[in-house]
Image (tube, grey):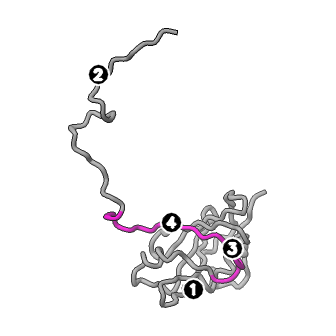
Amino acid sequence: MASTSRTRTGRGRGRGRGSGSSSLPPPPSTLPLIIEEFFIVVYEDPLVKKELPKKFADYLDGKEPAKVYLRAADCGPRLWTMEVLFDGQGRMYLDKGWEKFAIAHGVDFGCFVHFKYEGDDVLTVKVFDGTMCRRYYYSDDEDTDDESDDDVKPCIHPL
């Protein structure tokens, strides 16, 4: 087997044709903290209040809303009203309203619940089941005010 050698003609470092100056982004410690997305995993009773990540509570920094509104992704325009509790130690919880939302969207043990903060106290929610597959829902409910009815109207999970 014959061996061939290659002659290198480049500068030997990197692949670009830059002027040598680096345009790297600043280190992560100097970037502003923006918490727009986070998740929780349901390890305990899925119908009791749920703690949100402390970094998200910190991100709200003094704006501690009394209520937030959940919108299930791909489930129509309905907003689910959640009362929010802050414990004085930086922890934030979804309280009253969570049980109805959890029932309507089949949140159970082992579910992975993804939240995206949309601003104006609105969070879009995606639910993944215990197999880590996303649940897709649709709704025939045009009503966006869930405070007027006490019945839980579940979104429908297509088969």
Residue under label 2: 9
Q: Residue at x 45, y 84 (%)?
A: 64
Q: Mark 2 vs mark 1: give the one in front.
A: 2
Instruction: Report the Cα–Cα distance between label 1 and label 3.
Output: 21 Å
Q: Is residue 91 above or below residue 104?
A: below
Residue under label 4: 37
Instruction: Report the Cα–Cα distance between label 4 and label 2.
Output: 47 Å
- Residue 52, numbered circle: none
Other-residue count near label 2 (Cα within 10 Å), few / some / many at <14 / 14–19 / ≥20 = few
What amino acid is found at the position of numbered circle 3 in the picture? Tyr
Other-residue count near label 1 (Cα within 10 Å), few / some / many at <14 / 14–19 / ≥20 = some
What amino acid is found at the position of numbered circle 2 in the picture? Thr
In terms of secondary structure, where does tag 1 sit?
strand
In the rendering, at what x and y percent does residue 85 appear? 54, 87
Instruction: Report the Cα–Cα distance between label 4 and label 3.
Output: 20 Å
Residue under label 3: 43
Q: Is residue 76 above or below residue 63?
A: above
